Amino acid sequence: MADYFTETQIPKQKYYNSIPFPSVLSPNPKTAVPCSVSHLTEAIKTQKPFLDSLLHKTGTVIFRGFDVKTAEDFNAVVEAFGYEELSYMGGTAPRTNIVGRVFTANESPADQRIGFHHELAQELEPPSKLFFFCEVAPTSGGETPIVLSHIVYERIQQRYPEFVEKLEEQGLIYSVFLREEDDLSNIGGRSWKSVFSTVDKSEAEERATKLGIRLEWMEDGGAKRIMGPLPVIRYEKSRQRKIWFANIGGNGPFKKITFGDGKPLPADICDECMKIFEEECVAIPWQEGDILLIDNWAVLHARRATNSPRRVLASFCK
């Protein structure tokens, strides 16, 4: 299975110090080896050191052109990497387990945009790696933009040093309002019952405490889920650099983000930070069969809105 993969250049890639972002792997036409799922999984197992090194160097790897068509195919690919699975207990995005380690991506309506974030940045144990798989590609829009965390940190720190210093000192408090029942019409629509897999409030509190979450019960039967203060600017040891590890663009009727002292974030600076994310991001249109492997400690991701059918599946690793 040597040289089964070939690195491909595609439109919209960026280059930082001559390193492509993201990197893209396709079947090597010179090997004449089929691009079936079984051959792909075998190649992943035999070339794991190369793939790990590439992911560490670039932060994101797209596998494009392989014969991956179903959730079962995707699960086999995820399993081939051998990464330990991470439970989605405590996460607020509406998701459904499809098969094995495979879940739907956020099930909120596809015409709703999702801002840049590290997956489960508001948890004590965020996943180290994420997989996304495109089962149905939208005809327009619906991309999953990605951006390098250290790049946006450097730009924001240079432009707003006092803001970044305060974030480093205080961290952020994330408050999410959970309904009593699921509401899939919005991005954070899971109920507390769904988030903690129980209908018993005492059991929900116990499970929340184990995850470092505080719950405050609301009069309407819902709950306020509070995490933090959590660090925003973190030092990523394996690459020896500071990274931006937060979501500051999510304030709204179901979510509130504040400094560690409870004071509100400056809206004007947050808006400018969002512009920096957009300037530095890469949003490659999905193709059916694409698999996106993201290092969650190096890259933030988002979701562009679309009005056409779109189905993307996900899997999380410790």
Image (cartoon, rainbow, N blue to C red):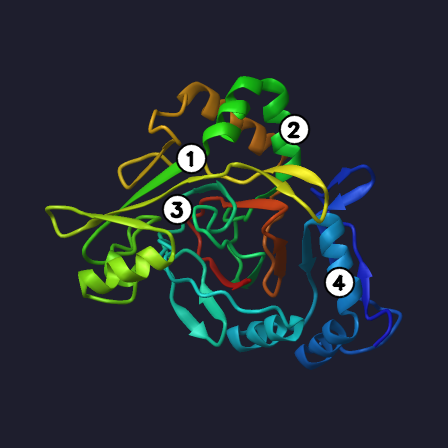
Q: Nearer the viewer, mark 3 or mark 1?
A: 1
Residue that numbered label 4 is attached to: 51
Helix, strand or loop at label 1? It is strand
The earlier-in-sequence mark between 3 and 1 is 3
Q: CA distance from mark 2 to mark 3?
A: 31 Å
Judged left or right of residue 248, residue 223 is: left
Residue that numbered label 2 is attached to: 154
Q: Nearer the viewer, mark 4 or mark 1?
A: 1
Q: Is residue 197 visible?
A: yes
Q: Nearer the viewer, mark 2 or mark 3?
A: 2
Q: Residues within 10 Å of mark 4 (few under 14, many from 20)?
A: some
- In the image, residue 106 lies at what x, y percent? 41, 55
Residue that numbered label 3 is attached to: 111
Q: Nearer the viewer, residue 214 or 116?
A: 214
**Kind of residue indicated by mark 3:** Asp
Question: What residue do we see at 59% from left, 25% from top?
Answer: 156
Question: What residue do we see at 53% from left, 57% from top?
Answer: 127
Judged left or right of residue 16, residue 271 is: left
Question: What residue do we see at 45% from left, 44% from top?
Answer: 305
Q: Is residue 159 above or below residue 281?
A: above
**Kind of residue indicated by mark 4:** Leu
Q: CA distance from mark 2 to mark 4?
A: 27 Å
Question: What residue do we see at 60% from left, 70% from top?
Answer: 78
Helix, strand or loop at label 3? It is loop
**Kind of residue indicated by mark 2:** Glu
The earlier-in-sequence mark between 2 and 4 is 4
